[in-house]
Image (cartoon, rainbow, N blue to C red):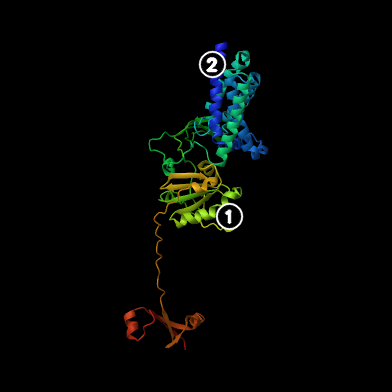
Amino acid sequence: MKYIVNISRILVGILFIISGLIKLNDPLGFSYKLQEYFSADVLNITFLEPYALAISIFVVIFEVILGVFLLIGYKSKFTVWSLLGMIVFFTFLTFYSAYFEKVKDCGCFGDAIPLTPWESFYKDVILSVLILILFFGVKHIKPIFNKLGLTVVALLSFIGCLWFGYHVLMHLPSIDFRAYAVGKNIMEGMIVPEDAPKPVQEFTWTFKVNGEDKEYVTNGSYPEVDGEYVGVETKIIEEGYDPPVKDFSIETMDEDFTEYYLSEDNLIMIIMYNLDTAEKEGVVKLKAFSDQAIKNGYTVIGMTASGEEAKQRMKEMYKLNFDFFLSDEKALKTVVRSSPGILKLNKGTVMQKVHWNDLEDIDLPEVEHKPIPKEETVAEEQLLYVIDGVQYEKSYVDQIDPEIIESVNIIKDTLVIREMGIVDFDSIIEIKLKK
């Protein structure tokens, strides 16, 4: 039993530390996942949504600390009881998500190791077994240091977690596991290969036949049934290819500019998923930065999910000299864990990405200015109005009642006009009035 307990102790401890550190690397991302769980469509505990970030930080730090406590044998009973309570909660959460198909990714390992809810549930079941072994064999969990050593390691672990969590919140995740990391090409991330596996779906059709509801299962085709159609439910049997970049676009209300801007050589993208909740200190810094970027030859655009009124208000309030485009809020939250967050791109490839606190770190060497297309100027045609042989201004002609006009003759041949001794007009409109 002693050896089984120690093996379980090592496995559970390491797994909790790794899982916690991955989420602590991106506490904002985990808070977004918690908001998804708290939403009305999932657990319907929406009153917790404003506290999602605080809860996420507490949970991930506690997860790491429990892993450390278990490995060093510090406060073994408290540690095992806490592990058991945490795994019961997580097992319920992942089962609920999987069974009711509410959340597609549990966020257990952040973006580093995406797991489906069923994969997460099975992982939690295995962990539950290992933790139960620890629970019943807690007497075999012995400390590996003396009392002072245990206290020092525990305290340093706690302080280290607090510092790391604060650091990534004030800057950006130390390791970026997302499809928008530096070096990744956003446009390429949207492409679905031609030979990519397609999703397999199951359709359950309900018909009323002879007064009774009967179900018919197909792969999508409408069943030939002599009965009254009631409804249909779909279920995904096998997930198809899921491109790493989803729902990202650069749009206005009328037009899609995604491909256009992701083909730009020198693009600065300023992201604020919600203009009303963007951090004011960061927004204040944008004016000088964007002015300098434009001066150095960069194209600057803003990205948000907010409406036209909020965009106009933001531009006027902070005197911003760039336009905002629309994109999905969830996609923008995935691009950068900061609002505002700033990306420098070259033909869709992320060259640099910073938190607004690190705005000064963006490298803006002067580049060749994009030529401004010349507008074609069309010379205004000079018209001479002649009424019964007398020249008049257009304003007088516009007031003539059409009922008294007998005929209109238009002379556009410039050669004829010049032969008549007229050099300042391109066309002559001769109007003859009724007598």
* Residue labelled with disc 1: 314
Check the image and name the residue furthest to the right: 47
Q: Is residue 351 left or right of residue 26?
A: left
Q: How many marks?
A: 2
Camera-side residue of 392 and 162? 162
* Residue labelled with disc 2: 7
Check the image and name the residue furthest to the front: 148
Q: Which of marks 2 and 1 is in front?
A: 2
- Secondary structure beneath dot 2 equals helix
Q: Can residue 206 be seen in this view?
A: no
Q: Can residue 374 be seen in this view?
A: yes
Q: Position of residue 89 (x, y in %)?
A: 63, 26
Query: Which image quadrant: the N terminus?
Result: top right
Task: Please rate how many residues cluster around mark 2, counting C-alpha atoms within 10 Å: few if below 14, some from 14 to 19, many from 20.
Answer: some
Q: What residue type is labelled 1?
A: Met
Name which of mark 2 and mark 1 comes first in the sequence: 2
Residue 106: which quarter of the image? top right
Tell me how far mark 2 sits from mark 1, CA to CA: 57 Å
Residue 313: which quarter of the image? bottom right
Where 83 falls versus 374 (above or below)?
A: above
Where 428 falls versus 146 (above or below)?
A: below
Task: Please rate how many residues cluster around mark 1, counting C-alpha atoms within 10 Å: few if below 14, some from 14 to 19, many from 20.
Answer: some
Q: Position of residue 15 (x, y in %)?
A: 54, 24
Residue drawn where x is 50% and y is 56% of the image: 291
Q: What residue type is labelled 2?
A: Ile
Q: Position of residue 298 (x, y in %)?
A: 44, 54
Camera-side residue of 258 and 150? 150
Marks 2 & 1, CB-CB < 8 Å contact = no
Residue drawn where x is 58% and y is 35% of the image: 163
Q: Is residue 430 left or right of residue 356?
A: left
